[in-house]
Amino acid sequence: MKRFFTTIKNIFSIEDLRVRILNTIGFLVIFRLGSYIVLPGIDPNRLNGNQGGIFDFLNTFLGGSFSRASIFALGIMPYISASIVVQLLTVAVPTFTKMQKEGESGRKKLNQWTRMLTIIITAAQSYGYLRATINQEAIISPGMFFTISSMMIIVAGTMFCMWLGERITDKGIGNGISMLIMIGIVSRFPAAIIQEADTKGLQGGLTLILEFLALFFVVVGVIALTQAVRRIPVQYAKQVVGNKLYGGKRDFIPLKLNSAGVMPIIFAQALMFIPPLVAQIWRDSDVGTYVGTTFSDPTSWQYNFLFASLIIIFTFFYTAITVPSNDIAENLKRNGGFVPGIKPGKQTGEYIDSILSKITLPGALLLAAVAILPAFAVMFGITQNFAYFYGGTSLLILVGVVLDTLQQIESYLLMRHYEGMMKSGRVKGRSQFAAA
């Protein structure tokens, strides 16, 4: 305990770090306050509240602002969707691929495309949100003026959230976009615990303790999945430059067990919304009713089997995009590096690709298992709001953001010659969701 308080004292004794932490807290407070400001022209007492299915899923990520019809109703989600689209375009479209390789200027162009696409996506989603998800009785004066003005406010709210995220990244601590998503998820945690405790009552105290114990081991398992790395040894050849000898050092290529992060779950979750929507076309037939009922229930085995299968497929797909083995091999060859026993160039690329394929399969299976854990939690009698924290995108984002933030804090401590946050080893963070 004494070491803990000493670490906290060291953190706040570094002026730059202290200012960044306070800035981050201030920006997050602004974000949370905005999520409670209801759109003009809506009576909050007549809103539907929780509607189940996809709406509960979005509401968890948005910290309840979705169900409250706030000015931040869509939050940062359209920006994430736009970022994913632009990231895929950098692989499929040569023009965007060229931008990505142009360095800082190319990055600025891609950011501009992402912002413009964010506005388009937000405008489209805001119209659907106003027409399909808000209880029409809650609108005081429905009409074209209300729709257009509300769409403009929601678009402005999303762009403001994006600006807050960028300010957190520049002037705060951690990745801003990921931090906004994390605070939205965490804000639902106390209410979920209270609901679970009320459901179990005094007689279910032991059950509640076992549930928290199970949650602890699930978190430990997700941390292990997030941090697991397969190291490929690399040897650099010695080079004589003038009268000095350079190179000859040993290094390694770190290949993560889960290189794709949360992206396969996000892609798969987006596709899982399609069967119930398509089923609405044939809702009067037995097939349409069966498909709509089955794939609207996250606890059904058909839903979870398809969900897990899509995650495994997208894990291989996204890993192939984010970890180009041939480019890694060419960079090694260009810098005088080689894998011992493997010929530089094409054979090195094939070797890295074979290792990547071997570790991606268990990583994909574990990621799919984490994604469907909430469904099993519900089957064992855990309330749905609390079950969201037993796996899925929520838990992966929480673990990734916390580790990345702790890593940045520890970097400041070590840079100022303070003791790190861990007695043995260092905190190894990751900003896997930052690309989104």
Image (tube, rainbow, N blue to C red):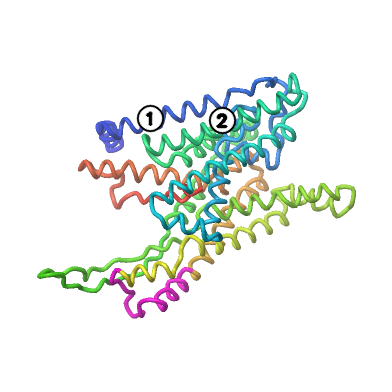
Q: Measuring 60% from the left and 35% from the top, which residue is drawn there?
A: 74
Above or below — where is 107 with respect to 25?
below
- In terms of depth relative to the viewer, which is nearer, 249 or 87? 87
Are the residues flagged by discs 2 and 1 in contact, CB closer than 8 Å? no
For the residues labelled 2 and 1, the Cα–Cα distance comes to 20 Å
Q: Measuring 56% from the left and 27% from the top, which residue is drawn there?
A: 35
Q: How many marks?
A: 2
Residue 8 marker = none
Residue 126 figure quarter: top right
Above or below — where is 347 with respect to 304?
below
x then y, percent, for residue 190? 54, 32
- What's the amino acid at mark 2? Gly
Q: Measuring 67% from the left and 53% from the top, which residue is drawn there?
A: 271
- What's the amino acid at mark 1? Asn
x then y, percent, for residue 57? 64, 41
Residue 36 figure quarter: top right
Give the labeled residue for mark 1.
23
At label 1, counting other C-alpha atoms closer than 10 Å, the crowd grade (few under 14, some 14-19, many 20 or more) is: some
Q: Nearer the viewer, mark 2 or mark 1?
A: 2
**Does 342 lie within the magenta span?**
yes
Q: Which residues are magenta?
A: 335-356
Which of disc 1 and disc 2 is earlier in sequence?
1
- In terms of depth relative to the viewer, which is nearer, 65 or 167? 167
Give the labeled residue for mark 2.
157
Q: In the drawing, does residue 382 fall left or right of residue 80?
A: right
> Please, what secondary structure does the residue beneath circle 1 have?
helix
